Amino acid sequence: MTTHSKAFLVGGGIGSMAAAAFMIRDGQMAGKNIFILEAAPILGGSLDGDGSPERGYSMRGGRMLTTDNYECTWDLFKSIPSLSTKGKSVFEETVEFNETHKADSLARLVDRRRSKVPVASMGFSMQDRLELLKLSSTEEEVLGASRITDWLSPSFFETSFWSMWATTFAFQPWHSAIEFKRYLHRFMLEFTRIETLAGVKRTIFNQYDSLVRPLEKWLQSQGVHFDQNCTVTDINHQFAGGKFVVTGIQLRRHGQSERLEVKDGDLVFFQNGSMTDASSLGSMTRAPAKLTKMDSGGWTLWEKLAAGRPGFGNPAAFNGCIAQSSWESFTVTLRNPGFFEQMSQFSGNQPGTGGLVTFKDSHWLMSIVLAHQPHFIGQPKDVQVFWGYALFPDRVGDFVAKPMSDCNGEEILRELCGHLRFDPEVVEAANCIPCWMPYITSMFMPRLRSDRPLPVPLESKNFAFISQFVEIEDDVVFTVEYSVRAAQMAVYQLLGVDRQVPPILRHDQSIRVRLEALLKAFH
């Protein structure tokens, strides 16, 4: 590389933004030589958050955070100044916020009688314990493309543990046994406190306002170029010395086709695949449209690059079954404080301290979470916002006689009030915006190790993948950490950075944590 070398990042999610920051901070690359190419009008990818009191606020989702893990994420955000707490980094702001807003869920599970389910016991039988131990100790080569149901009996999926673990992390019984095993190890510390969610940390606002916006501002201050509404359609390449070398980038911007030349010494980072590809929003009167990858093209480029090139992965392992990778979320904007007041009284938690409340017997398997308010920068004091989701949107509701995926916002609120036995007046004039996401858990689909490329494939010279669909040993997908770690690994390798990527903290090798997990399993 030279001082004139450039870096092109295809996709503007947290992975690309993190890669740009690592190149500047640790690779001494000038920000003016870094270009982020994003098809959407805003950055952040899946970490989105937008709206107003008048239009309603909307978030597709929010990733779980913990300061006991997420080594690369906090390594990055210790360097990024907060936008809302003067003189503090994003990391320092987050730690301080969680010291005063501690999580201690008092209503983690609610049954069909609107009663809080006792969750001190995980509800395991001896058979469940033995099968769980066997799965968690089986090598990944043996697990292969098997599903969780291949290793655990039907009774396991009726336990309180499964209801809490599945809805905390969005697992389905048919998902990858490997990913489930990795979660058991990576979050063994959370296993010991899954019923209270005490290990879950929250940002002061939603993750777009608290993570993406400060990082974007810092990158702007360093001179990074952001090309939004810019769709990359192809990556030109050649083979030199047996290595895959990118030579150009084809794109469409403002309706015009262009080609960016990639010169010797330049680098290209590609966010392959997308968990929020083809997502769609509904309204109070309209259900979200059911889109597929054919409507957006978010997977097309990876499919094109991977064709006939095993080292670049196998997208079909992840995007081949929408019925098994989809669920639906919803964001509710309120001007009537009644709902928050009644939820606080019912749950025993003030907003921001309780985490998910899951209606375990609901046909949709619906959960909601009331965050600390305000949840958006600029949100008025007389406005409240909460978020929810359901893992089985294809099932007919308990109080609305249709699948959630066919429901508008008003019908989703009616179903929610039915489970809570709340008078519909508490959500009077509310604005509920549903969001359908066909590929939201696509990274959990059963797969082989070869289905995901390495961040820097062995045959690559100047090209890297950074996303939820790369192979990182021992780490877990569907986390901010996975994208950031992939970015840090790729940057350090391609730039030859003489600094170690923060190692994964192996809580599962702590004698104390293992003993506490054992005691929890036998409680």
Image (tube, rainbow, N blue to C red):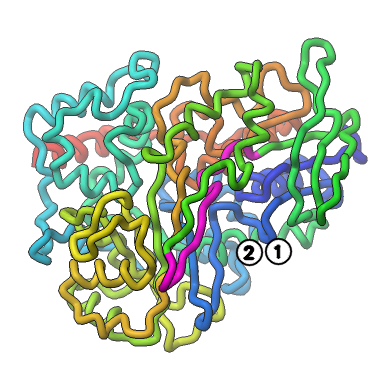
Residue at the spot 68% in from the left edge and 43% down from the top edge: 19
Residue at the spot 85% in from the left edge and 29% down from the top edge: 247
Residue tagged 2: 213
- How packed is label 1: few (under 14 Cα within 10 Å), some, or many (20 or more)? some
Q: For the stretch drawn in magenta, what is the main secondary structure?
A: loop
- Residue 245, horizontal then vertical, whole percent: 80, 23
Quadrant of the rendered structure where residue 99 is? bottom left
- Residue 242, horizontal then vertical, whole percent: 78, 11
Which type of secondary structure does the marked residue at label 1 adopt? helix
Depicted 29 relative to depicted 80: above or below = above
Q: Are marks 2 and 1 in contact (CB under 8 Å)?
A: yes
Q: Magenta part of the protein: which range?
A: 271-286
- Residue 427, horizontal then vertical, whole percent: 31, 80
Q: Tag on residue 217?
A: 1
Whether residue 38 appears in this view of the structure is yes
Q: Is residue 399 left or right of residue 319?
A: left
Outermost residue, top side: 242
Quadrant into which the N terminus falls = top right
- How packed is label 2: few (under 14 Cα within 10 Å), some, or many (20 or more)? some
Residue nearer the viewer, 463 or 215: 463
Depicted 219 relative to depicted 342: above or below = above
Assess whether residue 379 is covered by the magenta stretch.
Answer: no
Whether residue 499 appears in this view of the structure is no
Residue at the spot 34% in from the left edge and 33% down from the top edge: 175
